[in-house]
Image (spheres, grey):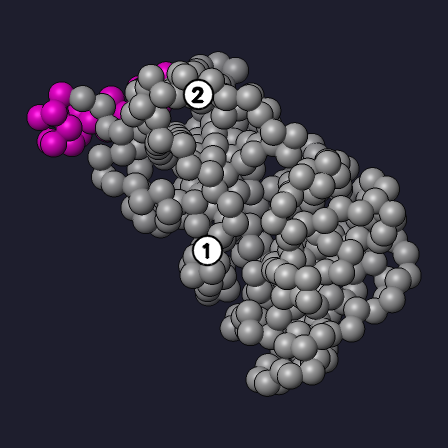
Amino acid sequence: MRAAVLRRGTVEPRIIDDPIPGAGQLLVRSLACGICASDLHFMDHPEAGADDDSGMSTYDQDVDIVMGHEFCAEVVDYGPDTDRRIARGTRVSSLPVLATPGGRKIIGQNPETPGGFGEYFLIDEVGARVVASDLPSEVVCVADAIAVGWSAAARARMTTREVPLVIGCGAIALSTIATLKGLGIGPIVAVDFVESRRETARLMGADVVVDPAEISPFQAWRDVASGSAASMRDMMAAAGLPGCVVFECVGLPGVLDSIIKGCERGTRIFSVGGPPEGDHLHTMTAKRKGLNIQFGGGPWPDHWDAAFEAVCSGSLDVTPMLGRSVGLDEVPEALDASRDANGPARIIVVP
């Protein structure tokens, strides 16, 4: 098959062997696959894979790896011990995790679990979800990105006495914003240096967008929260601001620490980002402020299913996040373009 292959930090289109489905697995043909920031983190930071003791992600620079984990595909063939409940040619997607003899592996982040930047890859039959929609595959494949923000917003369990502050307006932040809006949470304050990203955040449901070059995100939050408190009888009675819940969606060193230093006392921080190289945090400051910091991880399966249904049904419009589509020959250039903060939240690979 043809695939955009990662080896020694470089991606190039090549011909490689077709994957062979094992027990309980489906062979699928990639129809569309989004380029995610975690693809860039994976290829740029091989040391992060070496430090991953979960065994789910492995970057062996001397072996071919086909990335791509946000996919829509169609069923081509079946491995042994499958029920064959999904007909050939049916469009499907799934959580990007594959059961292998060596344990559960992230699709697109191991030599043995190729992803959607190639013509064919493998998924578990038990986890396959049928695309019950006429929407284009380029739209459907964004569901996995939506699921990450969906899960973060759901797990935060925000109350009407809290006002969210979303730091960064990339794809995961946008999905967090859209989910919070769907839950009736607000006003939502979204922060990014890039004007086009702020505008996309507004389209996805943000009530207030902030350029941190012009005003501190935390002062902007205080201004919004003060107005919110004035409209809440219970807050007026309590004579205080609503609680602050910060969603950190940047994933660059220093961002989480800057939130710890700048946020209100008692703030809850949900860190969905996380730099591959690690970070330094002023934990004493966090202790004195009584902060609650929760780290995101991947989406829970039920949250993934809910996000997938919302995207496929069209109840959550992801089109503001979409940019251009590219073929396999253009993947190297598209990966570089995805580093540009002024670009769209998602460039889609159509093998």
Observer-nearest of 25 and 335: 25
| Residue at (22, 23) in percent of width and height | 241
Q: Is 172 in the magenta?
A: no
In the image, residue 182 above or below residue 30? above
Residue corresponding to mark 2 = 283
State the residue in front, 344 or 279.
279
Would you say the residues marked 1 and 2 are in contact, meaning their CB atoms lie under 8 Å apart?
A: no
Q: Compare marks 1 and 2 and give the one earlier in the sequence.
A: 2
Which amino acid lies under the numbered mark 1 shown in the image of this protein?
Answer: Trp
Residue 96 lies, in percent from the top left, at: 61, 59
> Which quadrant holds residue 302?
bottom left
Q: Residue at x 16, y 32 (%)?
A: 232
Within-10-Å neighbours for mark 2: few <14, some 14–19, many 20+: few
- Assign a secondary structure to mark 2: helix
Give me the disc on residue 316: none
Three-letter code, disc 2: Thr
The residue that appears at 40% across and 32% down in the rendered structure is 293
- Quickly name the residue at label 1: 300
Would residue 101 appear left or right of 307 to someone viewing this image? right
Taking the image as shown, residue 149 lies to the left or right of residue 134, namely left
Q: Residues within 10 Å of mark 1 (few under 14, many from 20)?
A: some
The magenta stretch spans which residues? 219-239
Residue 337 visible from this viewpoint:
no
User: What secondary structure is found at the residue carrying circle 1?
Assistant: loop
Q: Considering the image in quadrants, where does the C terminus appear?
A: bottom right
Q: Main secondary structure of the magenta part?
A: helix
Q: Residue at x 87, y 66 (%)?
A: 17
Q: Position of residue 289 (x, y in %)?
A: 33, 19
176 left or right, relative to 5: left
Gap in angstroms between the C-alphas marked 1 and 2: 28 Å
Residue 34: percent from the left, percent from the top?
66, 52
